Structure formats: structure tokens, C-alpha cells
């Protein structure tokens, strides 16, 4: 066995993906401290919004007993979560890409 030892499947896959990225011209740039701060701020904001939506949803859910109304409320809640999640992901990607 070599000094480095055996590699896990994950390590082998990550090496293969890094090699494919290098061959296709994808450039890896480390994030700056400013970028990390902006990304953290975006995550914190959307984590708070998602928590707020969750709390409001639970409050409304406690007041409704009719199955049809509950299903409609659940559908609205899922739409809100999906919208917030996609907004967050888009802003994170934009912040990474633009270099803030």
C-alpha cells in the first residue's frame, strides 16, 4: 500500500469531475472573504424567511380543520418554500459568478 492509502469512491469521483472540469475549461476560483460574507448574508436572510413562512403556516394550519382547505394551505406553503428556495439559489449563484 502507498503512503496515501486507498481512496474512497467519493475521492475518486471528485478527482474525475475535477479532471473533466479542467478539460472543459471550467475555472476554479477560491471565494474571497467578501464573497463568503455575502453568501452567508444571503443564506441567513432566506433561512429567516423560510422560518417565518413555516411559523405562519403552522399557525394557519392549527386553525383549519377542513381537509380541502388544509390541502390548499399546504399547496400554498409548498409554493412559497419553492419560490424562496429558488430565489435564494439564484442569488447565491449570481453572487458566486459575479464575484461580488
Image (cartoon, grey):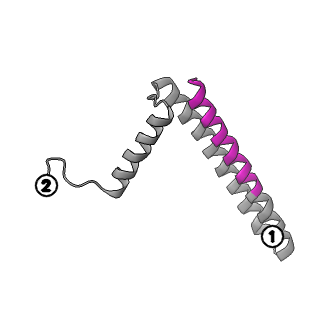
Q: Nearer the viewer, residue 1 or 71?
A: 1
Image coordinates for residue 76, horizontal then vertical, percent: 80, 59
* Among the 4 quarters of the image, the one containing residue 42: top right
Q: Nearer the viewer, residue 99 or 34?
A: 99
Image coordinates for residue 54, horizontal then vertical, percent: 68, 56
Residue at 81% over, 75% down: 65
Q: How many badges with numbers are in the image? A: 2
Q: Earlier in the sequence, mark 2 or mark 1?
A: 2
Query: Does 41 sit above or below residue 11?
Result: above
- Span shown in magenta: 79-100
Q: CA distance from mark 2 to mark 1?
A: 59 Å
Query: In the rendered image, is residue 56 in sight?
Result: yes
Is residue 35 rendered to the left or right of residue 5? right
Query: Does 33 sit above or below residue 83?
Result: above
Look at the magenta stretch and give its main secondary structure: helix
Image coordinates for residue 93, horizontal then vertical, percent: 61, 36
Question: Which residue is tagged 2?
Answer: 1
Q: Label 1: state its secondary structure.
A: helix
Q: Quadrant of the C terminus?
A: top right
Is residue 91 rendered to the left or right of residue 8? right
Of circles 2 and 1, the one toward us is 2
Query: Does 42 sit above or below residue 77?
Result: above
Q: Quadrant of the N terminus?
A: bottom left
The answer to if 26 sits in the magenta stretch is no
Q: Nearer the viewer, residue 68 or 9?
A: 9
Residue at 53% over, 35% down: 40
Question: Which residue is tagged 1?
Answer: 71
- Whether tag 2 and tag 1 are in contact, CB under 8 A, the answer is no
Is residue 2 rendered to the left or right of residue 25? left
Is residue 44 rendered to the left or right of residue 73? left
Amino acid at each position: 500500500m502507498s503512503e496515501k492509502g486507498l481512496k474512497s469512491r467519493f475521492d475518486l469521483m471528485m478527482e474525475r469531475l475535477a479532471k473533466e472540469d479542467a478539460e472543459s475549461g471550467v475555472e476554479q476560483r477560491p471565494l474571497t472573504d467578501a464573497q463568503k460574507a455575502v453568501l452567508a448574508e444571503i443564506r441567513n436572510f432566506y433561512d429567516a424567511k423560510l422560518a417565518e413562512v413555516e411559523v405562519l403556516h403552522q399557525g394557519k394550519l392549527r386553525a383549519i380543520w377542513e381537509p380541502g382547505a388544509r390541502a390548499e394551505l399546504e399547496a400554498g406553503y409548498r409554493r412559497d418554500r419553492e419560490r424562496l428556495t429558488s430565489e435564494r439559489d439564484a442569488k447565491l449563484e449570481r453572487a458566486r459568478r459575479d464575484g461580488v
